[in-house]
Amino acid sequence: MPNYSYDHVHLISSDPIKAAEFYEKAFGAKRVNVATHSDGTTFAVLSLPGTKIIIGSPPHNERRTLQDSPQKYLGLEHWGIMTDNLDEAVRNLKVMGVQFVQEITRFPGLSIAYVMGPDNVLIEIMERK
C-alpha cells in the first residue's frame, strides 16, 4: 500500500488577501505567494508548520446549491493528501469504488487526481517528484 500524509487545505474566499491576513495574524502563517490567474481568480499561498493553506477566489460569483461542485462556493474547496505512489493509490481507490472527479493529471514535478469523499468533500490525492 502507498504511504500517505497530509499536505494542504484549499479555501475559497470572496477576498483571498483579507483571508490570508487573518491566518497570518491569528496563527502566524507566512505568506509564500500571491498570484492572479488569467481568469481573474486570485490565490494566496500560506505556510503554516505542518501544512499549507491555499486561499482562492471563486471563478464566478455563483450561488451554492446541492448540485454544485465544491469548487463553486465559499469555504473549504478541497483538502489534499500526499502519496509516494499516485498510480497505485488510484488503482486502490478505484477497487474500493471511490468516485473520481478528475483522473490523474501530470505537471512537471507534480501529479494529482481528485476524488469525492463522504458528504461531497473534494479530496486531492497528489505525488510530488
Image (cartoon, rainbow, N blue to C red):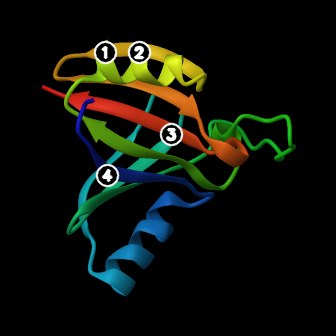
Q: CA distance from mark 3 to mark 4?
A: 11 Å
Would you say the residues marked 1 and 2 are in contact, meaning their CB atoms lie under 8 Å apart? yes
Q: Is residue 44 left or right of residue 55?
A: left
From the image, tell me which residue sits under label 4.
Answer: 6
In the picture provided, is 25 more to the left or to the right than 114?
Answer: left
Which callout, 4 or 2, points to the residue nearer the camera? 2
Label 4 CA crowd tier, 10 Å (few <14, some 14–19, many 20+): some
Per the image, the residue denoted by label 2 is 91
Q: Is label 1 in a helix, a strand or a loop? A: helix
Question: Residue sitting at 41 percent across and 15 percent down?
Answer: 91
Q: CA distance from mark 4 to mark 1?
A: 18 Å
Say what amino acid the circle numbered 4 marks. Tyr
Res 86 quadrant in image: top left
The residue that disc 3 covers is 123
Q: Residues within 10 Å of mark 1 (few under 14, many from 20)?
A: some
Amino acid type assigned to the residue bearing label 1 in the image: Asp
How far apart in space, not on screen, are marks 1 and 2 (Cα)?
6 Å
Disc 1 + disc 3, Cβ < 8 Å: no
Task: Tell me which numbered mark, 4 or 2, is placed earlier along the sequence.
Answer: 4
How far across and how far down the image is residue 109, in percent? Answer: 16, 23
- Is residue 46 among what the camera can see? no
Give the image location of residue 114, x and y in percent: 50, 28
Asked whether disc 4 touches disc 2, contact meaning CB atoms under 8 Å apart, the reply is no
Q: Nearer the viewer, mark 1 or mark 2?
A: 2
The reply to whether discs 3 and 2 touch (Cβ–Cβ < 8 Å) is: no
- Disc on res. 87: 1
* Mark pair 3, 2: CA separation: 16 Å
